[in-house]
Amino acid sequence: MVFEYTLGVVIPVPQPHRETLRAWREEYGGEATAPIAPHITLVSGSYLNSWEKAAAQVRRVAAAVQPFDIELGAAQTFRPASDVVFLPLDTGADECWELHRALLGDALRHESAFAYHPHLTIAQNVPAAQLDAAQAALTGTRLSFTADRIQLFDTRGGEWNFSEDIELGS
């Protein structure tokens, strides 16, 4: 029997920045962002036939990567291509790219409407006034943290579910 699941691999944002970003996401992105913790997506939308094989690959990739620093910069937008306001990675984008590429081998196959661009979403698919407000309010943003783990999510059961927290370099 063959199953297909959607898999997500993200870098979680640690405290105290997690709560700050969650507040900004709720203010500008609306209630739809509330259940989603602030994160930087590495892979999303991959379909797999073997959950264990895919999870093992994520663990192997994570073990081979050492923790690295991330600095989030001033808000930018993908408009007009996409109604999104995000914080770019001023530091750490290269490491995210390397992780993204390494994760896509073997058991994972990435399908996305957009090219990979490491970022942290603040607001998306909300009225233009909210996007404008987010971009204006977060022009001086500078948040730094160490990415020392990745998290694995899946859609087994139909909704996004947290599956595993995996330390980098272990």
Image (cartoon, rainbow, N blue to C red):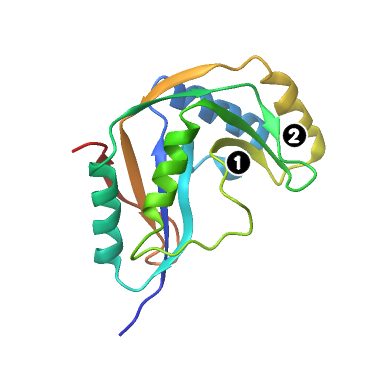
Choose top left, top right, bottom left or bottom right for residue 88. top right
Which of 148 and 156 lies nearest the eye of the viewer? Answer: 148
Above or below for 153 versus 65? below
Q: Are marks 1 and 2 in contact (CB under 8 Å)?
A: no
Which residue position is annotated with label 2?
A: 131
Instruction: State which quarter of the image contains the N terminus.
Output: bottom left
Which numbered mark, 1 or 2, is in the foreground of this view?
2
Q: Is residue 106 left or right of residue 114?
A: left
Around disc 1, counting alpha carbons within 10 Å, would you say few (fewer than 14), some (14 to 19), or many (20 or more)? Answer: few
Above or below for 37 versus 159? above
Q: Is residue 48 left or right of residue 40?
A: left
Q: Give the structural element (helix, strand or loop) at label 2.
A: helix
Count of labels shown?
Answer: 2
Which residue position is annotated with label 1?
A: 31
Measuring 53% from the left and 63% from the top, which residue is drawn there? 111
Measuring 59% from the left and 33% from the top, which residue is drawn there? 26
Name the kind of residue labelled 2 in the image. Leu
Rendered location of residue 23, percent (x, y) = 55, 27
Rendered location of residue 106, percent (x, y) = 34, 64
Which of 164 and 145 lies nearest the eye of the viewer? Answer: 145
Measuring 26% from the left and 37% from the top, which residue is drawn there? 168
Spatial distance from mark 1 to mark 2, Cα to Cα? Answer: 14 Å
Measuring 57% from the left and 42% from the top, which residue is drawn there? 117
Rendered location of residue 92, percent (x, y) = 46, 29
Q: Is residue 118 left or right of residue 46?
A: right
**Mark found first going from the N terminus, 1 or 2:** 1
Around disc 2, counting alpha carbons within 10 Å, would you say few (fewer than 14), some (14 to 19), or many (20 or more)? Answer: many
Choose top left, top right, bottom left or bottom right for residue 130. top right
Instruction: State which quarter of the image contains the C terminus.
Output: top left
Name the kind of residue labelled 1 in the image. Glu
Q: Residue furthest bottom?
A: 1
